[in-house]
Image: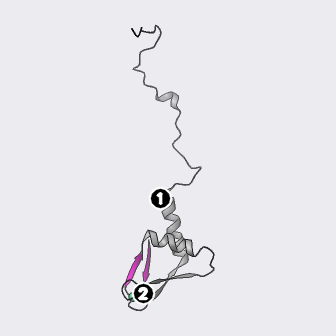
Amino acid sequence: MVRITCMRCSRSFTLTNEQIARIVEESRDTKHKHYVVNCPYCRQPSKAPLAQVRQAHARLQALIAPAAGETPAEEPAAETTPPSEAPAADAPSAE
Ligand SMILES: [Zn+2]
C-alpha cells in the first residue's frame, strides 16, 4: 500500500493496486524518482516516490504468485496410500 500526502490540501490518499501496477508499468524506462499522480480531492498533481510504489508492487506480486522454484509442497505419494484397502491377492470376478 502506498500512502501519499497531497502537498496542496495536505490530505492523504492511498494508491490502489491497479494504480500501482500501472505506475510501475509506465515508469519502467524512466529514471525519475517520483511519479506524478493527481490528488483525488483537489486534483492537484502530487508526487509518489517510485521506490515505494515499486516496493509495494513487488510485495503484491509475491502475494499473487509465489516465486517459482520455491515450492515446499513436495510430499512422497507412496506414504499417503490408505492401508484400509484390502490386498488384491485374489482378484474378485467382476461378473
Ligand atoms: Zn489535494
Asked whether 13 falls inside the magenta stretch, the response is: yes
Instruction: Tell me if residue 88 comes above or below residue 33 in the rendering.
Output: above
> Is residue 63 rendered magenta in the image?
no
Q: Are marks 2 and 1 in contact (CB under 8 Å)?
A: no
Q: Residue furthest bottom?
A: 8
Q: Residue placed at 52% from the left, 75% from the top?
A: 23
What is the x, y in percent for residue 19? Answer: 46, 73
Ligand 1 within 8 Å of the CB at mark 1: no
Percent from the top left, x then y, of residue 76? Answer: 53, 33
Residues 71 and 22: in front is 22
Q: What is the number of the mark on residue 36?
A: none
Residue at (48, 63) in percent of width and height: 60
- Stretch in magenta: 1-14
To which residue does mark 1 refer? 63
Q: How far from the left and from the top, in percent, is residue 83?
A: 42, 21
Tag 1, which secondary structure? helix
Callout 2 amino acid: Cys
Q: Nearer the viewer, residue 94 or 87?
A: 94
**Label 2: which residue?**
6
Quadrant of the rendered image containing residue 24: bottom right
What kind of element bears circle 2? Answer: loop
Determine the CA span between mark 2 and mark 1.
28 Å
